[in-house]
Image (cartoon, rainbow, N blue to C red):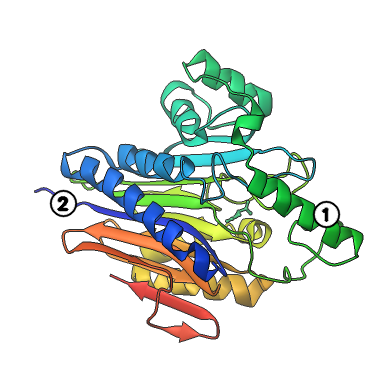
Amino acid sequence: MKTQPVLLVHGGAWAIPDDMVESHQRGISRALAAGYALLQQGARALDAVETAVAVLEDDDTFDAGRGSFLTRDGRVQLDALLMDGSNLRAGGVACVERIRNPIHAARLVLDKSPHVYFVGIGAEEFARAHGIKLIDNSQLVLDRERQRLDQAHQMALRGLPDESFSGPPSDQEPPSYTSHDTVGAVALDSFGNLAAATSTGGTLNKTPGRVGDSSIIGCGCYADNLSAATSLTGWGEPIMKLVLGKWAVDRVADGFAPGRSAQDAIDYLHRRLNGHGGIILLGPDGRYGIAHNTPRMAWGVSNAGGVQTGLNAGGVQTGLFRGVAG
Ligand code: ASP
């Protein structure tokens, strides 16, 4: 029997300002349309999440691909992971600077390598050897981001905290919910297989070489047909410390609904480490959950019931926490 396909995408969880709402929703809608069209034609979940994330990487609105936040020294450094829930194959790249669509490089790692994860120049060379054209890093850098980095440097000079957390270890929460425009997708295909993908430029003003949760298996991304598929966004360090993606899918395997598990994961993140962020979570039966404890999260869902997009998940609330389930 054929399964009804489902696709969820997100474009970051933070205080998305009113004047950026339209661009976020437009990007989410485009990614959904591209990925869901594939699912309807019988494509695999893995192809759908790769395509949806590539659309978001190509959109300057988001912190992925071109237009990403800059490192402290003014470069774009990108991380991405995708995972196939049918066989647990995964491919990831981190700290790549010369690849326009790191999710395609991650797919090559999954398809063509016995390994799971490549970083830096090794990742770029692997991608080049498998047909990806390397570009100059300047092609990924926008003036908008140069200005944003200048502001972060000014704040640092004035002794004001910024979100880079590039100093000594700190469990202090970043001062604002700015700058979390990472993108991700999870899908269920008509064969009943799950997949997940996440791509990011990381955090603004990050120390070069820093890698966050997004591309780390089980942290910002995970998929297993026997549990669920998930992609996360938000303040990466707490998400990594809790291996939150795997935590969330394991809750589904334990019998909790994806809606409940998504809410629990964000609650746990906040309770345990005062972290903030958002999650999309999809079970093998097509039920899903979306939750965040930031003022807004850009998300969208396509399934047999149609297309839904939003910026506030609505529904259950615990403090700043908001969740939606389907
Ligand atoms: N989680 C990402 C990171 O820490 C940032 C984000 O979600 O925007 O690299």
Does the residue tagged 2 have its C-beta within 8 Å of any atom of ligand 1?
no
Q: Decide if ligand 1 comes within 8 Å of the CB at mark 1.
A: no
Query: 255 or 302, which lies in front?
Result: 302
Position of residue 129 in the picture relative to residue 86 (left or right): right
Q: Residue 273 in the image: x percent, y percent?
A: 68, 71
Mark 2 burial class by Cα count in 10 Å: few <14, some 14-19, many 20+: some
In front: 169, or 135?
135
Who's the residue at 56% across and 39% down the image? 66
Q: Read off the residue under disc 1.
A: 153
- The amino acid type found where label 1 is placed reads His
Counting other residues with Cα less than 10 Å from the Cα at mark 1, is it few (<14), some (14-19), or many (20 or more)? Answer: some
Q: Which residue is mark 2?
A: 3
Where does residue 88 sit, x and y in percent of width and height? 40, 40
The amino acid at mark 2 is Thr
Of the pair 294 and 67, the residue shown nearer to us: 67
* 250 to the left or right of 277: left
Position of 158 compared to 6: left or right?
Answer: right
